[in-house]
Amino acid sequence: MSEPQQLQRRLGTFDATAIGLGSMLGAGVFVVFAPAAALAGNLLVLSVAVAGAVAYCNAVASAALAARYPTSGGTYVYGRKQLGEWPGFLAGWGFVTGKSASCAAMALTFGSYVARDYAVPVAVAAVVALTGVNLLGITRTALLTRILLCIVLATLVFVGAAAVLGPHPAAEPAGVYSGGAEGVLPAAGLMFFAFAGYARIATLGEEVRDPARAIPRAILAALAAAFAIYLLLALLLQAHLGERLGSTTTPLLDAVLASRLAAAAPLVQAGAAAACLGALLALITGVGRTTLAMARERDLPGPLARVGGAHTVPFVAELAVAAVVILLLLTTNVMTVVGFSSFGVLVYYAIANASAFTLAAHPGYAPRWLNAAGFLGCVVLAFTLPPASVLTMSAVLAAGVAGRWLVLRFRQHQPRQ
């Protein structure tokens, strides 16, 4: 049997960090503060801190594992290597299904900001265009991600300035929050949706130069930057909008509209569009690489493992992911999948922490006790999410496990060649 085609190592530490940060500062930062604030109220900052702490545990586990196994697939590969085929499959299936829905959500957010009345056609066009960028090779992906990241950072700085300058004279005064302590953990679970981008660095492990050094540095740098930005934004938005933060679908845009810089609101809309594109680009890339890894192990159809073209990309997996996302856009209202995606990703990272716990050698930045804390944190946040999200994703995971079991049984009864 011939060896599977390998991807080429073309990314440096800066490129990998940009991809991870670009994934985290995506559509999530423009929408997730509102539902989190509705749950946690005045304790929103505590929810951000809890989500950041769990994300840190997950990040160091991912960094240690990615340095040990520098190949595409992320926790799907780590789970298989350290825990066995079934935990690995569960991680990969949770990532592929949850993040495919996230791709659709971010594409639709982009469409809504650009042309509200034609959101779905614009979203489909964005998926097609960004899939084309990915097919041109990973270095093109990293270049576009850096450009979009600069636009998003400038937008966030502008929103922060608007909040600091104070309310517009005609703006309504900020009211009192209605959320409370009982909503801190569910809000942290939702906030985790915005932190999950560093997984993209690990899924690109086969394409990073000097992965043992570059991947841990890129993951920790991207997470530290995102945490500082989210914490500052939570403080500013909370002080500026008050209870209105929990009732809007566009918190950053509303922050500018209610400020002395309201006339420049279109700049925030443009920044949000850029954020969605950046996150969508990185998401399609990461889901495609995990699909590639699962196909190599025959947990997904074999043709998805094909790598080729002038730029050595997993073109069949990329096209398949794009097709699934477009199907979701055409048939489903995916703006409700933040909790659904969070549950899938928390399951993914619970398996990552369990995998890191079993490593024979632990680097200084990833002690075994931190892996145990990360595992417990993921489980707690996952099962404190809204019940509909927990039940929906649990059903999807169960369907994947049942499907794999049936396929394995069928293979056992096939005559050997």
Image (cartoon, rainbow, N blue to C red):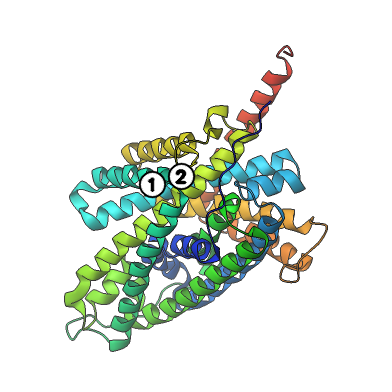
Return the residue nearer the eye: 371 or 283.
283
Residue drawn at (68%, 61%) of the image:
212
What residue type is disc 1 on?
Ala
Please identify the quadrant where the N terminus is shown: top right
Q: Answer with the quarter of the image where residue 65 lies.
A: bottom right
What residue type is disc 2 on?
Ser
Position of residue 330 measured from the top left corner of the image (x, y, whole percent): 31, 37
Tell whether 27 sits left or right of 47: left
Residue drawn at (51%, 59%) of the image:
197
Q: Residues within 10 Å of mark 1 (few under 14, many from 20)?
A: many
Tell whether 55 sits left or right of 234: right
Q: Are marks 1 and 2 in contact (CB under 8 Å)?
A: yes
The Cα–Cα distance between marks 1 and 2, rounded to whole angstroms, is 7 Å
Which residue was labeled with disc 1? 104
The disc placed on residue 22 is none
> The residue tagged with tag 1: helix, strand or loop?
helix
| Residue with the most extreme right position | 360
Please identify the quadrant where the C terminus is shown: top right
Return the residue nearer the eye: 393 or 9.
9
Which residue was labeled with disc 2? 100
Tell whether 20 sits left or right of 88: left
Tell whether 231 sits left or right of 172: right
Tally the numbered discs. Answer: 2
Residue drawn at (18%, 86%) of the image:
169
Residue drawn at (70%, 14%) of the image:
414
